[in-house]
Image (cartoon, rainbow, N blue to C red):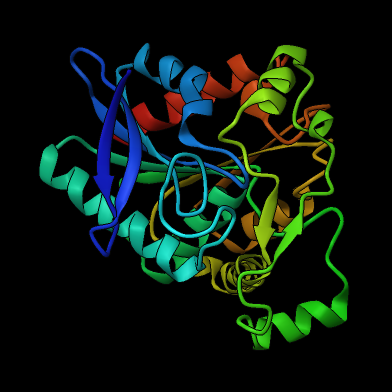
Amino acid sequence: MRDITLYGHEKNLLPAKYWPCADAKATLLIIHGFGEHCGRYAGMAQAMNARGVEVYGYDQRGYGANPLGPRGYARAADLEKDILAVLDALREKSDLPLFLLGHSLGGGLVAYTLAHSQPSVRAAILCSPWFELVSPLPELPVKILKKHPKILGKASLRNAVPQTGLCHDEAVLRAYLEDPLVVDHIAFTLAADMLSAADYSLAHADRVLVPVLMSHGSKDGICSPEGSRRFAAQCPKADLHIFEGAYHEVHNEPAAKDALFALIGSFILENL
């Protein structure tokens, strides 16, 4: 693994990691989820390396080691444009087939980007994407925030979901709790943006032009698998896999991660 720097749409610094592999057949860009950072995807990256896939990931605005803006704060439009800018940069680096993966908030962003901007990628993977929250925000504030997302400025909302809901691996949970790069809150503006992005993605799933592999844990207590089912039903190119008994981070579940990695690896190689 190498620490590198990528750049967003405003030439803003994106602290990043690169997991190279010999004789790579494809490139995968990982977009991390709420509160976390790209370094938490080392296990997935190494599993992809073993299958001939080089991997990039970066810390999004407001998260990880990214220096731009208050922690937990970003606008979804900027996050989408950063994804597009990094995809462009990776195309200039290599002519390898390019794949895009997003988890949780990152999955919601990737889905929105696929439907809204239709980027030139070979295929995409959505892991536990943010379409529908298990514990939705109160209806009235949500309506106000969607119409006036700047009304609360950069005020933030604490994450009320217990970390034990991430996965069944005690070592992963302990590392998450002790990780200084983890953020435990999200700006109201970003939450409102993500809710609007989810609405758009669900209403325009038929605009997605590339194959989409979807995974979701049946016991996810953060992002409901029902949201993934709704998206898959509307997206002709989507293939949804539900992992029974798995929580939010299927890629960190001892009983499911190997099967997920095999599924993702096969999907990438089948779509070269």
Q: In front here: 33 or 12? A: 12
Q: Position of residue 238 (x, y in %)?
A: 54, 50
Q: Position of residue 197 (x, y in %)?
A: 58, 69
Q: Is residue 212 above or below residue 178?
A: below
Q: Position of residue 123 (x, y in %)?
A: 38, 45
Residue 139: quarter of image: bottom right
Q: Say which residue appears at 25% left-offset and 15% top-offset.
A: 21
Quarter in which the C terminus is drawn: top left
Quarter in which the N terminus is drawn: top left
Q: Say which residue appears at 12% left-offset and 39% top-offset.
A: 93
Q: Is residue 238 above or below residue 199?
A: above
Q: In front here: 125 or 143? A: 143
Q: Say which residue appears at 66% left-offset and 57% top-offset.
A: 186
Q: Position of residue 53 (x, y in %)?
A: 31, 23
Q: Kindly tell me whether residue 208 is visible in this rendering.
A: no
In the picture, measured across the screen, residue 14 lies left or right of residue 30, that is: left
In the picture, measured across the screen, residue 271 lies left or right of residue 93, that is: right
